[in-house]
Amino acid sequence: MTDVSNTHATATLQDRVVLGLVKFFRAEWSGAFLAILILGIAIELATTGRPFFHPSNLMTILNNSAAIGIVAGGMTLVIITAGIDLSVGSVMGMTAALTGYVASFWGFPPYLAIMTGLSIGLAIGAFNGSLVAYYGMPAFIVTLAGLSIWRGTGHLSTGAQATPKLPETFDYFGRYNPFAGLRDAYREGTLSGVWERIGAFVDDNWINFFRTFQMSMLIFIGFFVVLTIIISNTRYGRWVYAIGSNEPGARQAGINTPRYTMITYMFCSFSAALGALLFLGRAPYAKSDYGQMWELDAIAAVVIGGTSLFGGRGSLWGTFMGVILLKLINNGLTLAQLDTFWQMVVTGLIILVAVGLDIVRQSKDPESVRKLLGALAAVMAFLALMTPGAIFLRAKIALLEHNAAASLREAGESLAAGQNARLLSPDEIAQLQNAASSNLVAMILLLALVLAACSVVLRTSRINSFVLAAVFVLMIAPVVLMGYQITTPFLVLGGASLLGSAYVHALFARARALDVNAH
């Protein structure tokens, strides 16, 4: 009897776990949350020094994410309506440039310059939204044209020149620390009573906590809290989802879809202008080339957070985590000393994976989920490969260009300036040859891992998924010994994806059985 009870209890526990997993993964933001958790733990275990989850480190990530996060928040609303705004980066650059320009050269008081920038953002949103909502033009075309129009307008208006140092008022949107004045007053001995005790607490914990406290982080968090309340508790929020789910049906239900579509585009461009202010709060001057490729980063953050590009589904909470995840990955690539161009490649890959996740979630097919997890493992292996692979390729290409230029010179050809620049000294040749040879083994190992993960997408068994997940984890030791510690989080996440793929069919079958039994 006891054995039967124990078996029943175990089965019940397993069923609760399955139902809990089903409920968790039904949330649009579940993938981003899980990726942040796994990457954070992996970074914590792989790095030395200050822990990853230290409050000051987390606040630094939030500070660095603030400006693009604000832009992504506005983009979320547009995408929920089944639209798109490809002009947000250009709007951000133009409003940043013009805000700094009128403050520096026209003598506008800082607060009037700030209002001017925000008003420009609203006007651009009204222009884009009117063309989309009232004239029926495709949002992709309208905002693609805006990407060029607003960037060009910013360059023309300011001569593409940087402004002098901005007034300190702009610091209140960025680097200003609201606890700095309290700490200074405590150290000067001008506080008394409860304020003195608070000042002492701030001073004692300044290095570990309060030093990295900035207004950009507070505005970022506050913006998402307010916007979430609006979307979740107002008629406007309900109608945004209704328009994205079925615009003709929403119109027949009496919703003024053109008006609310235009309002959504206005809010998106306003968010881009507000993001520009947060960027100016951390930058020394204003320039019209700010915000380049921000439209790609904003869309990536939104789709990573689980918002459907087909409209009608998504959450700001998911976008918030998508921004953090994107910043984590970009920071990891920066620590790996990879070029910015690699980060652009990675952002594109992330968008593809996120869109694939959205399609798979709608299909509710376990085989599609398994293939997606295999593809995610392949992407993680590729991210790990990029560090040794980029060094190897860069060295080999430099040697190839040197040999080509040297051959032309020996043949008596006149070399152009760019070709002369490719000629290397013997010491430089030796360094590049050493770089290529020292990264060759790691590159081959990780390339084999990428190919093995790709094979999982095509066809695999549960045993193969287990074995390959173990290979991902075991690969950590040799690559770390070779000096590629930064690859550890990607290998851990790839192994976790493969482990999950091994259980997909069993989880789906059990979840469906429980659903049938529940009815």
Image: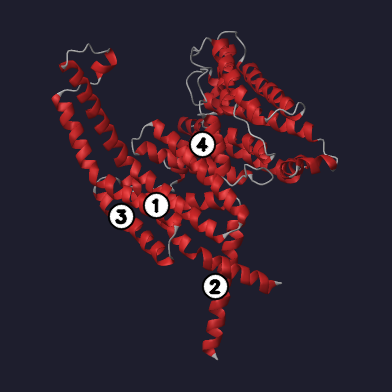
State how far apart marks 4 and 3 are (Cα). Answer: 31 Å
**Residue 26 location, x and y as percent?**
61, 56
Label pair 4/3, CB-CB below 8 angstroms: no
**Residue 210 location, x and y as percent?**
48, 39
Relative depth, front residue between 141 and 243 = 141
State how far apart marks 1 and 4 are (Cα). Answer: 21 Å
Relative depth, front residue between 112 and 471 = 471
Q: Nearer the viewer, mark 2 or mark 4?
A: 2
State how far apart marks 3 and 1 are (Cα). Answer: 14 Å
Label pair 2/3, CB-CB below 8 angstroms: no
Q: Nearer the viewer, mark 3 or mark 1?
A: 3
**Residue 390 location, x and y as percent?**
32, 37
* Residue bearing mark 2: 14
Relative depth, front residue between 339 and 63 = 339
* Residue bearing mark 3: 475
- Lower position in the chain sequence, tag 2 or tag 3: 2
Badge 1 crowding class, 10 Å Cα cut-off, few under 14, some 14 to 19, many 20 or more, is many
Disc 2 element:
helix
* Residue bearing mark 4: 65
Q: Determine the image quadrant of residue 394.
A: top left
**Residue 382 location, x and y as percent?**
38, 45
Q: Please indicate whether residue 158 sits to the left or right of residue 519 in the image.
A: left
Q: Which residue type carries mark 2?
A: Gln
State how far apart marks 1 and 2 are (Cα). Answer: 27 Å
* Residue bearing mark 1: 42
State how far apart marks 2 and 3 are (Cα). Answer: 31 Å
Q: Which residue type carries mark 3?
A: Met
Disc 1 element:
helix
